[in-house]
Amino acid sequence: MNDISTSPIEESSQRALPRWGRILAWVALFALLVIVARALLQKQQGPVAVGQKPPSFTLTTFDGKSYGPAEMAGKVVLVNFWASWCKPCEQEAADLEAAWRYYQPRGDVLFLGIAWTDTEKASLGYIARFDITYPNGPDLGTSISQAYRTTGVPETYVIDKNGNLAYVKLSPFTSLSEIKAAIDPLLGP
Amino acid sequence: MTVIKALFAIVLTLLTGLFVAGAVSAQQPTPSDDQVNAIAKQLYCPVCENIPLDVCPTTACAQWRELIRQKLADGLTEQQIKDYFVQQYGDRVLGTPPPRGINWLVYLVPPVAILAGAYVLFRAFRSWKRPIQQADLEPSILEPPAEKDTAQDEYIHRIEEELRKR
């Protein structure tokens, strides 16, 4: 009499994947989930927050000078992300330049303008139009804005003399006094 | 006299050459919108996500299209222009990510997932089909149904008893 439960056909249908295959499939699935989770987490983090250590970067300006951690050390650094096509950026351009001219003689304040997804020709036109004299350069490969997790322009980050992020503004400054109110407390007596 | 003539001929040739070269350079046509858009449709500006550069209406995208036109006029190839944009604005300006680093996942995961899914389905279909075939075969192999059923059927048993009495 045939025993159905032990027939060769049944046995082959019940045969599972080889052990290495199952392990590989689970490892691949887990790795994929980790990558997706990391990407989602990074998207949900938002911009760098006050009190955090800001990402370090080196900016090469339109005239070829470099500003990196060495040039920023021991200074209050204002990092402004802008673009020539950005209308709100125009609102604060004159105030930022006035603030720079006010603080520049002290020597312990540095302003850095970072042109985000802008063409060089348009950026230089904007700089000339607002007579901007503080260092400005392109965000090559959008690496700086990605490190700061910016959400658009204009955005301004002020770093204190100890290298910590002290102030964040995700919209344009509305007056010179507002910029001074962000910087003065960091300068000390 | 012959030397002066030769010198004059050389200077004249050089001047003519310069003039012709200048004229050719000046006559180089401005790249058309179609030429610009052929490259622009492969690029995406980070400001307007998911809108190809050729149809994006923002000022930023208009500036980028002008930049493409300028690069084409400068004699750059399509690939050189795309490389320039990647260098300036990062990989995310490209419609299709370049196959390097973690980007390989984009190219590998879908086909691997499809193949794995097909394999799982194949196994599932086989396992679903087999028990049905065996269930069909089971009664004929194991026992003759007639004997079993009639023996236990009380109605048939009573009929047989009545017939026997006659």
Image (spheres, coloured by chain):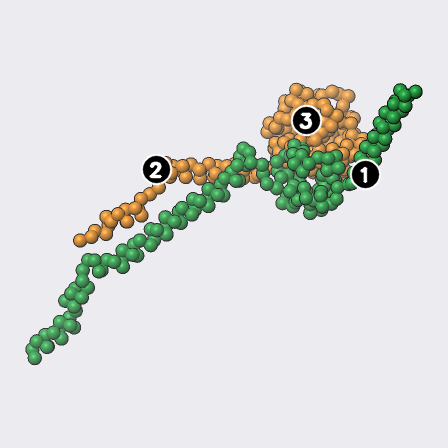
B59 lies above or below B159: above
Q: Chain of mark 3?
A: A
User: Which residue is found at the position 55% from the left and 36% from the top?
Assistant: B99
What secondary structure is found at the residue carrying circle 1?
helix
Q: Nearer the viewer, residue B150 or A145?
A: B150
Q: Chain of mark 1?
A: B
Q: Which residue is mark 2?
A: A19
Disc 3 to disc 1, C-alpha distance: 39 Å
Mark 3 vs mark 1: give the one in front: 1
- The amino acid type found where label 3 is placed reads Leu
For the residue pair A150 and A7, the one nearer the viewer reads as A7
- Please determine whether, in this image, residue A135 is positioned above or below residue A92: above
Q: Colour of chain B?
A: green
Measured from the top left, where is residue B139 in percent x and y? 22, 60
Asked if residue A18 shows in the view, the reply is yes
Q: What label does residue A59 carry, if any?
A: 3
Who is closer to the viewer here, B77 or B146?
B77
Q: Which chain is orange?
A: A
- Looking at the image, is A176 positioned above or below residue B150? above
